[in-house]
Image (cartoon, rainbow, N blue to C red):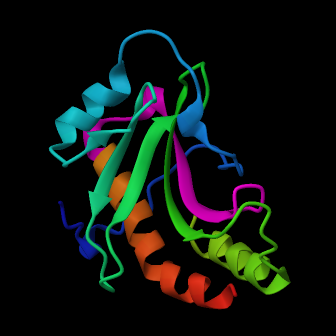
Amino acid sequence: MSRYRRTRRLAIGAVGLATAIACPLARAQSGTPGPLKDLLDQTGLVWSPVEQSVDSWRVPYESSDGRGPVEVFLTYNDDSRQFALLFATVVDRPEYFDFGKDVLVECMRLNNDYSGVKFCLDARYGDIDCQTELLMSALDAETLALSLERVADLADQHRARLDGMVP
């Protein structure tokens, strides 16, 4: 497992706003692994493929609170493969969970605090994700590594508080 460096909290200029999505890992895609896997290989990070999925990987990071690793998932945001999607689950509850207004307001506040990264509530799947999208044509291995670390760091920083707000 890699340990991300908190000193590397840089404001990555992520292109596009991340939208709340259900589960990008179940997407069926054809073909062989492409540039995203090549970039991930170049980062030198420890990673593993997501089972029963094509072009999706998980990168584990140690947590600061001992609650288990923070796993950042990496995939393409759609079949056009123009954007990479990076996300970590911050809070996980049963499907169709009602998070309540206070949690929504807190996530909106966090979205204002961190440019290019969004805390998304998905009641259908009962989770809150911290996610970002990166334009593939502008992505290199260093930016990918920094972005993965940033998502892991923000998920780690805020998961205890957000989890505590949800019954």
Residue pictured at 60% horizontal, 83% vertical: 162
Could you tell me if residue 122 is visible in this image? yes
Residue pictured at 70% horizontal, 82% vertical: 106
Residue pictured at 18% horizontal, 61% vertical: 2
Q: Is residue 99 left or right of residue 66?
A: right
Q: Is residue 28 left or right of residue 40?
A: right
User: Does 87 lie within the magenta span?
Assistant: no
Height in image: 106 above or below 83?
below
Q: Which picture quadrant has residue 148?
A: bottom left
Q: Residue furthest top?
A: 31
Could you tell me if residue 117 is visible in this image? no
Residue 108 vs residue 93, the one in the foreground: 93
Q: Is residue 159 left or right of residue 23?
A: left
Residue 92: image location, x then y, percent: 59, 68
Q: Is residue 11 left or right of residue 8?
A: right
Residue 64: image location, x then y, percent: 30, 82
Height in image: 131 above or below 99?
above
Q: Which picture quadrant has residue 97?
A: bottom right
Residue 36: image location, x then y, percent: 36, 29
Residue 94: image location, x then y, percent: 68, 66
How many numbered markers are drawn? Answer: 0
Residue 139 vs residue 128, the one in the foreground: 128
Q: Which residues are magenta?
A: 116-143
Q: Report the quarter where the N terminus lies.
A: bottom left
Residue pictured at 44% horizontal, 80% vertical: 157
Q: Report the quarter where the C terminus lies.
A: bottom right
User: Does 142 lie within the magenta span?
Assistant: yes
